[in-house]
């Protein structure tokens, strides 16, 4: 399949607010993204021509934002709405090997839906992890550096060389990835064995570092994880904000080259064009 | 009151309660600018360029051939003083609607804030007034939670501290938007038959009498009496309103629209109808309510948030309602446009209101007396003692709340959502950051043209010399824009002053406006929108006269933009512009408890020439870092550049004007910048006989060393950073 045939569903509800840059990131690479309201997939309040079927798309992208206001745990409301009406479609979509991306609030939604880390199966009945309130207890908008630790399973990072440090900025209040406290070690080992850990927050030398390099206090500095098959990927930082060099926070010091986030979108389009 | 009585006597009936309430709203200072109009007309309204497209709820300017941008700033002072979190949040909501109703997609927020000192002794805070620290925390959180949720980057702003703001903090909120020119709408109906569709939030008892409350002095009773005047914001109603409204507008379904702000329905219906040369009939019974039992007058004047009025042709109404339904946003036809220039209201089948629009919207215009403020010439000049070294003064200045790093605030605001923020508010080498002068957005996908946004205000200068202070504010805006490589293009201002019924307060206003207008007119920079906020007083006195400016500039190619942090060892650093012993209102004089009435003046020719040198140097790639010289003067500007770049600098200031060393270091003379020049390209900096450029030294080492025949300052950059970075964290900790 050619990139121009890859249809991307950029899914949104009220409060999703990073859809424009997510949409553009796919469009700039020649894919066919579409901004789709969840109600268009569930068929609520929409006309026949506005109705959409998830299975018609090749990639599902959940952008950042504050879906439904996130006045309860971030992502929980979007996840509940999705799970109640779309569970079957989602499971089939993922089973077919189609990629799902969740950035920031999208990551929170994937975790709340049980699609990540999905240690056993495709969708867990209950969330197996949580993106808790940052250690600072504040919203943190700052540049973060991510080291790629994935060994090759993830469909979204094939174009990023191992251990490469990418600048991908963070902007969230709830990004502290945690696992059940009594089983953290075991979960981490399993994630490691399954090659489910994708990015870790590091300092400029590549070391796991504390605040502010790790903006939230996440377990083991984990910034992004994927499912066992590698086709569902969630991360807190925003690759779509650094598609171009000139939106890097320090680009006036180093003006050459593409933005570090672009490789995430190139990787998944590579995957889609080869596999689907 | 006399005019109201005569009006109804002519008609042989008594006014209804709805009618009286309505007139009260429409004629408040907030809505009709009755005290300020005279001066605004004289000094600033006349500035025009062919790029001004519209002056509606927001000003609309040409961005490029196909696009326009909208801008507006306004105050939300009184609500924020009573209910900081909610007041600030709804301020953001309101300003977004002002931009939205021009048909523009909001793309950036700007927040200049003014507080009393954070460590102000609690026992000195007047009764009924909240402590500055509480207000600061609540207001920042309100802006953060609303701005972040609604998905707009907060890219510029500022925080000022002064004792005069203890009794009345100032919260100004600005918004900038972008649109295809073909989608720009007027705040007007198209003609009779248009259906008025009310969209967004439901109407409740919150925010009743908001505008009349905004046009009064705060007292200790304000809290209990006016809590109901503060509206409640809901960003998750606003966010889908933005989508639905822009969607409906892009499909060509909307004839005109207007935001429900101050005065609620009572202002919007008359204004949108009259702007189209018509009147309107509204059935108040159709307005969706938050709760049962509101009296018609309450529905009519409520300022409940997140509401907008759309004028829609009858054939398009169903499609508009469908678009809003998809986003779960209430949208209700509540009335229609009629050819007679009257507003008629019905409630449960009964006519409760019938007033001619020309009477309703013809608020009085006052020509109130003004006279020179009594403070003039009160304090004589007192200069600080000269010293051998100024290390301690520099470190202290860097740590003062007015100068220190505002990262505590800035990092709580998402400043890059939408992915278009090219030049960000915090700038520096990774892991280090200092302030930039302006933010730059790249609003159009297939173009490298940029929109620069800067905030400027200098209440200290305006307080001593309002005319020069007003000029200084516009100069600062121009400096900030030029420092990133942008040409000033337009500005909008929020003028926060005291009670205009007091002649000395009004004089301050007139002089400040005169100064601002003079510089802007001469540079040809129009002000297509603006806002006046009077009555910023508590029993303890008025706030410093505070014009806050949101300036927009055009960058021809964002890839040429520069930031303020020093880039590379070995590069030359120079000062552009002339320094004078204008120490009045300077941070240094305030720190050393010295006095001077000589506030920096603006030589408009020098400003224009200086901007050409700086912008030319940036566009030619000769300038790799640039910072304007403002609070704290040259020494602070150099220190901030070192902190951002995490690198030292050796500067010799002996070639500057023959002045005292501390004047050279800390003067805040206008129209000046520090530039870092790329090695080998120094000669590319444009030359101009009106602009003085003095080479200061070289980027090198890890200390800031400033000398003039002898060492004046020698401090490690890490120590500068420590002073600069820690203040707000300590005060808020």
Image (spheres, coloured by chain):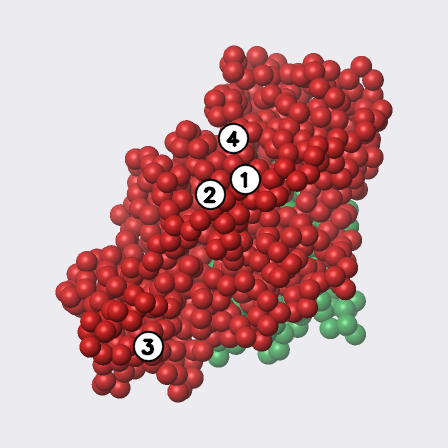
Chain colours: A green, B red
Rendered location of residue B526, percent (x, y):
38, 38
* In the depicted structure, whether residue B406 falls above or below residue B595: below
Q: Mark 2 points at which residue?
A: B510
Q: Looking at this rendering, what residue extends furthest in the right direction?
A: B388
| Inter-mark Cα distance, 2 to 4 | 28 Å
The answer to whether dots 3 and 2 both sit on one chain is: yes
Q: Mark 3 points at which residue?
A: B18
| Inter-mark Cα distance, 2 to 1 | 8 Å
Report the quarter where the C terminus of chain B lies.
Answer: bottom right
What kind of element bears circle 1? helix
Q: Residues within 10 Å of mark 3 (few under 14, many from 20)?
A: many
What kind of element bears circle 3? helix
- Label 2: chain letter: B
- Residue B197 seen from this side: no
Q: Which of marks 1 and 3 is nearer the N terminus?
A: 3
| Inter-mark Cα distance, 1 to 4 | 24 Å
Q: Mark 1 points at which residue?
A: B466
Instruction: Tell me whether circle 2 and circle 1 mark residues in contact (CB < 8 Å).
Output: yes
The answer to whether dots 1 and 4 both sit on one chain is: yes
Q: Residues within 10 Å of mark 2 (few under 14, many from 20)?
A: many
Instruction: Tell me whether circle 3 and circle 2 mark residues in contact (CB < 8 Å).
Output: no
- Which tag is nearer the camera, tag 3 or tag 4? 3
Residue visible at 70% across and 16% down in the picture: B658
Q: Earlier in the sequence, mark 3 or mark 2?
A: 3
Q: Which of B41 and B477 is in front in this view?
A: B41
Residue visible at 62% across and 69% down in the picture: B220
Instruction: Tell me whether circle 1 and circle 3 mark residues in contact (CB < 8 Å).
Output: no
Q: Mark 4 points at which residue?
A: B482
What kind of element bears circle 2? helix
Is B278 left or right of B710, judged from the image as shown? left
Find residue B281 and report its image quarter: bottom left
């Amino acid at each position: 399949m050619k990139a121009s045939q890859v249809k991307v569903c950029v899914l949104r509800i009220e409060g999703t607010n990073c859809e424009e840059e997510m949409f553009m990131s796919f469009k700039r690479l020649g894919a066919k993204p579409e901004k789709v309201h969840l109600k268009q997939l569930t068929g609520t309040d929409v006309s026949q021509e506005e109705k959409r079927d998830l299975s018609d798309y090749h990639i599902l992208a959940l952008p950042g934002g504050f879906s439904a206001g996130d006045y309860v745990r971030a992502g929980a409301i979007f996840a509940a709405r999705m799970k109640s009406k779309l569970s079957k479609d989602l499971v089939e979509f993922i089973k077919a090997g189609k990629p799902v991306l969740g950035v920031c609030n999208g990551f929170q939604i994937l975790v709340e839906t049980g699609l990540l880390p999905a240690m056993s199966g495709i969708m867990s009945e209950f969330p197996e992890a949580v993106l808790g309130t940052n250690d600072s207890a504040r919203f943190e908008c700052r540049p973060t550096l991510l080291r790629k630790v994935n060994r090759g399973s993830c469909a979204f990072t094939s174009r990023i060389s191992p251990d490469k440090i990418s600048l991908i900025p963070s902007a969230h209040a709830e990004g502290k990835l945690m696992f059940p406290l009594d089983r953290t070690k075991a979960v981490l080992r399993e994630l490691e064995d399954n090659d489910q850990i994708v990015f870790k927050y590091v300092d400029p030398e590549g070391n796991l570092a504390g605040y502010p390099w790790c903006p939230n206090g996440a377990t083991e500095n984990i910034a992004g994880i994927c499912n066992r098959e590698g086709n569902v990927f969630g991360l807190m930082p925003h690759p779509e904000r650094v598609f171009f060099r000139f939106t890097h926070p320090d680009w006036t010091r180093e003006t050459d080259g593409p933005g570090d986030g672009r490789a995430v979108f190139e990787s998944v389009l590579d995957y889609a064009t080869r596999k689907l | 009151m006399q005019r109201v009585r005569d009006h109804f006597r002519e008609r042989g009936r008594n006014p209804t309660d709805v009618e009286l309430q309505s007139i009260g709203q429409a004629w408040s200072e907030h809505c009709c600018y009755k005290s300020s109009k005279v001066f605004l007309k004289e000094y600033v309204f006349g500035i025009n360029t062919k790029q001004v497209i519209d002056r509606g709820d927001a000003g609309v300017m040409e961005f490029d051939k196909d696009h326009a941008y909208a801008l507006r700033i306004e105050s939300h002072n009184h609500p924020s003083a009573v209910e900081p979190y909610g007041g600030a949040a709804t301020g953001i909501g309101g300003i977004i609607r002002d931009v939205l109703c021009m048909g523009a997609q909001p793309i950036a927020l700007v927040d200049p804030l003014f507080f009393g000192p954070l460590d102000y002794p609690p026992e000195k805070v007047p009764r009924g007034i909240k402590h500055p620290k509480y207000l600061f925390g609540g207001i920042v959180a309100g802006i953060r939670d609303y701005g972040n949720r609604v998905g707009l980057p907060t890219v510029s702003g500022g925080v000022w501290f002064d004792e005069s703001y203890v009794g009345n903090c100032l919260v100004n909120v600005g918004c900038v938007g972008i649109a295809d020119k073909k989608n720009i709408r007027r705040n007007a109906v198209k003609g009779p038959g248009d259906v008025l569709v009310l969209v967004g939030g439901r109407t409740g008892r919150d925010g009743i009498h908001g505008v009349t409350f905004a046009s009064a002095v705060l007292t200790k009773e304000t809290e209990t009496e006016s809590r109901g005047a503060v509206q409640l914001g809901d960003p998750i109603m606003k966010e889908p309103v933005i989508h639905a409204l822009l969607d409906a507008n892009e499909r060509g379904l909307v004839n005109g629209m207007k935001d429900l702000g101050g005065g609620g329905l009572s202002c919007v219906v008359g204004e949108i109808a009259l702007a189209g040369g018509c009147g309107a009939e509204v059935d108040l019974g159709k307005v969706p309510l938050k709760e049962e039992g509101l009296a018609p007058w309450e529905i009519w004047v409520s300022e409940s948030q997140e509401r907008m009025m759309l004028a829609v042709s009858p054939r398009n109404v169903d499609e508009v309602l469908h678009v809003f339904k998809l986003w779960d946003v209430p949208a209700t036809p509540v009335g229609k446009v009629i050819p007679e220039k009257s507003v008629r209201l019905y409630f449960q089948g009964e006519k409760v209101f019938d007033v001619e629009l020309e009477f309703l919207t013809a608020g009085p215009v006052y020509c109130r007396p003004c006279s020179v403020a009594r403070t003039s010439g009160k304090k004589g000049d007192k200069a600080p003692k000269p010293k051998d070294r100024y290390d301690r003064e520099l470190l202290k200045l860097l740590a003062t709340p007015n100068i220190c790093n505002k990262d505590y605030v800035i990092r709580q605001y998402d400043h890059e959502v939408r992915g278009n923020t090219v030049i960000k508010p915090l700038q520096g080498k990774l892991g280090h950051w200092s302030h930039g002068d302006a933010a730059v957005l790249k609003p159009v996908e297939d173009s490298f043209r940029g929109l620069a946004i800067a905030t400027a205000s200098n209440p200290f200068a305006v307080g001593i010399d309002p005319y020069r202070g007003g000029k200084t504010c516009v100069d600062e805006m121009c400096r900030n824009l030029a420092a990133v490589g942008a040409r000033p293009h337009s500005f909008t201002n929020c003028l926060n002053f005291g009670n205009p019924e007091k002649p000395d307060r009004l004089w301050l206003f007139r002089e400040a406006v005169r100064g601002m207008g003079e510089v802007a007119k001469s540079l040809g920079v129009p002000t297509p929108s603006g806002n006046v906020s009077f009555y910023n007083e508590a029993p303890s006195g008025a706030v410093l006269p505070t014009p806050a400016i949101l300036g927009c500039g055009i960058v021809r190619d964002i890839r040429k933009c520069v930031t303020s942090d020093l880039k590379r060892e070995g590069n030359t650093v120079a000062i552009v512009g002339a320094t004078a012993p204008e120490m009045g209102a300077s941070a240094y004089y305030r720190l050393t408890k010295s006095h001077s009435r000589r506030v920096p003046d603006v030589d408009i020719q020098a400003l224009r020439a200086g901007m050409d040198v700086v912008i030319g140097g940036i566009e030619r790639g000769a300038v790799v870092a640039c910072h304007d010289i403002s609070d704290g003067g040259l020494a602070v500007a150099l220190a901030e550049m070192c902190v951002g770049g995490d690198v030292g600098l050796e500067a010799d200031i002996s070639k500057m004007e023959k002045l005292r060393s501390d004047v050279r270091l800390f003067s805040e003379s206008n129209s000046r910048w520090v530039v870092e020049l790329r090695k080998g390209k120094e000669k590319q900096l444009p030359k101009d006989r009106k602009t003085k450029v003095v080479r200061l030294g070289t980027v090198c080492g890890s200390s800031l060393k400033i000398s003039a025949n002898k060492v004046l300052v020698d401090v490690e950059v890490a120590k500068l950073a420590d002073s600069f970075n820690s203040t707000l964290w300590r005060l808020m900790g």
